[in-house]
Amino acid sequence: MAGNQVAKQRLLRWGRGLRGSRMSSILKNLVRSSIRRTGYDTVRRSQLEIGHDAYLDIRSNVVRSSIRRMGYDIVPKSEFEIGHDAYFDIRKIIGSNAPVIFDVGANVGQTIDTLRKFFPSPIIHAFEPGKATFDRLARAHSKLPYVHLNNLALGCKPGQQIFFENSDPYMSSFLPLGPDGWGQVTNQRDVEISTVDRYSTQQGIQSIDLLKSDTQGFDLSVLEGAKGLLSARKVRLIFLEITFQEVYEGIPRLDEIYRFISDHGFELVSFYKFYYLHKRAVSTDALFIQPQFQISGAWLSVPNVAEDAQPTGVVQYRDADGCLYPASQIEGMAAATK
């Protein structure tokens, strides 16, 4: 009995000795040894900061590896700087709660939904030429405040052009499918085309905070139709998809698009997520800014640029007005002018 009492007293004294830092240290070691037996390990929080290791070992954190398997990641707050998330950057640069935005190639409204999460009251002018796609767009977004839906396309000059509707609505375009394209053309029809400049004049729009274009290879034509506003430095940001592979016939190359944008005074903010096909980059999104504008605030007063100023460089397949066309339409255009 006396021996049991002595053992009990020793156990109590040992337990009291584990309080505070000693108890914390023992528990930490127990937790870490348990995690190590699973093939992982713990690391100090400072080791996960930017600049510590360019290739963080996914074994460094059990929770992080689990989240990564779901297609996500945990990143330090410092990573949310320019270049990490396009819409975060757009919001940070524009600053205004009610920016004027052109959503060219609106599809079924994915960009509209995203922009409305980042801005309280964005004024969005959306353009979608596909009939069935526009119907879906209108059903979900026609009653939203400050959202103006237009069932037409924007290009380099007003008129009509053949629109190739694809079995995958995302692939519908004014350009025929190229060797790297997918889906099937289900319909061809003439579609009305306006321009950024003409629409802006008709609507009394004097400046655009964000010109977004995702038109499946037609983006350079959209920009060419905005020469007036671009030359007058009345467009603050350009956000567009750039395609590297021959998804469409006669699609403009990266250097042609970049030259046009650069010649109008824009500078690259960042490329964002890359998409891949056949183990090669097929497309990415890019954000460009007029450097004369503040990062966040009002427009700055800048000298006007001559509206007739022409960018340097020649792009293939242009008509007398400088508009870009796919190769398959060149013969028909030539025959029509004879």
Image (tube, helix red, strand yellow):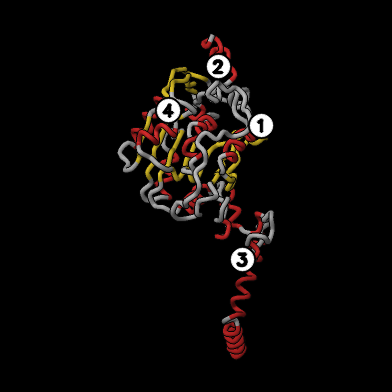
Residue at 43% x, 50% y: name it.
118
Residue mark closest to the camera, 4 vs 3: 4
What is the x, y in percent for residue 46? 63, 66
Q: Which amino acid, mark 2?
A: Gln
- Mark 2 or mark 3: whose residue is earlier in sequence: 3
Q: Secondary structure at mark 1?
A: loop
Q: Which residue is mark 3?
A: 45
Work out whether residue 313 or residue 41 is closer to the camera in this orientation and state it: 313
Q: Which residue is mark 1?
A: 278
Q: Residue furthest bottom?
A: 2
Q: Quadrant of the N terminus?
A: bottom right
Residue mark closest to the camera, 3 vs 1: 1
- Mark 4 or mark 3: whose residue is earlier in sequence: 3
Q: Quadrant of the C terminus?
A: top right
Q: Is residue 253 above or below residue 70?
A: above
Q: Which amino acid, mark 4?
A: Ser
- Mark 1 or mark 4: whose residue is earlier in sequence: 4
Residue at 43% x, 54% y: name it.
298
- Mark 4 or mark 2: whose residue is earlier in sequence: 4
Which mark, by number, is residue 194?
4
Task: Give the alpha-carbon distance from disc 1 to disc 2, as whole Å.
Answer: 28 Å
Task: Give the alpha-carbon distance from disc 3 to disc 1, as whole Å.
Answer: 38 Å
Where residue 3 sits, quadrant-wise, is bottom right
Q: Which residue is mark 2?
A: 329
- Number of other residues with Cα within 10 Å of mark 1, as a class: few under 14, some 14 to 19, many 20 or more: few
- Mark 1 or mark 2: whose residue is earlier in sequence: 1
Residue mark closest to the camera, 2 vs 3: 2
Q: Which amino acid, mark 3?
A: Arg
- Mark 3 or mark 1: whose residue is earlier in sequence: 3
Q: Which amino acid, mark 1?
A: His
